[in-house]
């Protein structure tokens, strides 16, 4: 089982044992990508879930997905070589994160990320494809979000271990 990094180690780890941010870093730098079918997305989600929960079933909460939608969309774009159009991203959210968001929720966020210069949009024949516009900025946003989530998770864990819930 892989060991999870502390919030201060996110974005600075060098261990081959780390999967989440180190894998994302590789993806943002253009190495370690798989084919366009989305297997990297599926493999990454499966590895994270297995490292945290083993064989235990896990289901994502839609409210948490929505609260981190910008960072999650950037991560999904970074993990893909192609097929980064809105419909595929919606499919990824549904298949990998048990979340059925409407196009009215996802597309405005994609457009805002483009306006902010995090993503760039390429017009294709029948759709738009999203790519990272500034990989360093995207990496920084993902690392900051990971630190926040890990820090909160560690506070919750400490409360469960040390709190008086009787």
Image (cartoon, helix red, strand yellow):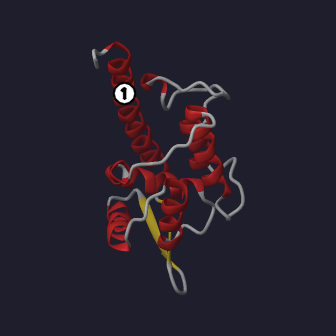
Q: Residue furthest bottom?
A: 125
Q: Which residue is mark 1?
A: 151
Residue 86 placement, left or right of 34:
left
159 in relation to 74, above or below: above
Q: Quadrant of the N terminus?
A: top right
Q: Quadrant of residue 35?
A: bottom right
Other-residue count near label 1 (Cα within 10 Å), few / some / many at <14 / 14–19 / ≥20: some
The structure residue drawn at horizontal position 36% and vertical position 21%, both measured from the top left corner, is 160
Q: Residue furthest front?
A: 166
SS at badge 1: helix
82 in relation to 21, above or below: below
The structure residue drawn at horizontal position 54% and vertical position 37%, both measured from the top left corner, is 21
Residue 104 placement, left or right of 46:
left
Q: Position of residue 64 (x, y in %)?
A: 35, 48
Q: Position of residue 112 (x, y in %)?
A: 32, 64
Q: Nearer the viewer, residue 106 or 153?
A: 153
Q: Position of residue 91 (x, y in %)?
A: 52, 67
Q: Nearer the viewer, residue 57 or 109?
A: 57
The structure residue drawn at horizontal position 52% and vertical position 25%, both measured from the top left corner, is 5
């Amino acid at each position: 089982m892989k060991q999870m990094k502390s919030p201060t180690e996110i974005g600075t780890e060098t261990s081959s044992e780390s999967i989440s941010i180190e894998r994302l870093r590789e993806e943002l730098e253009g190495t370690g990508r798989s084919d366009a079918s989305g297997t990297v997305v599926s493999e990454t989600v499966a590895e994270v879930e297995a490292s945290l929960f083993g064989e235990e079933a896990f289901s994502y909460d839609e409210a948490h997905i929505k609260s981190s939608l910008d960072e999650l969309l950037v991560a999904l774009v970074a993990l893909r070589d192609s097929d980064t159009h809105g419909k595929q991203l919606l499919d990824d959210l549904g298949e990998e994160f048990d979340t059925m968001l409407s196009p009215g929720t996802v597309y405005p966020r994609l457009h805002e990320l483009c306006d902010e210069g995090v993503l760039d949009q390429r017009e294709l024949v029948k759709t738009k494809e999203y790519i990272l516009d500034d990989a360093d900025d995207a990496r920084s946003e993902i690392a900051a979000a990971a630190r926040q989530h890990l820090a909160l998770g560690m506070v919750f864990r400490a409360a469960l271990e040390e709190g008086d819930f009787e």
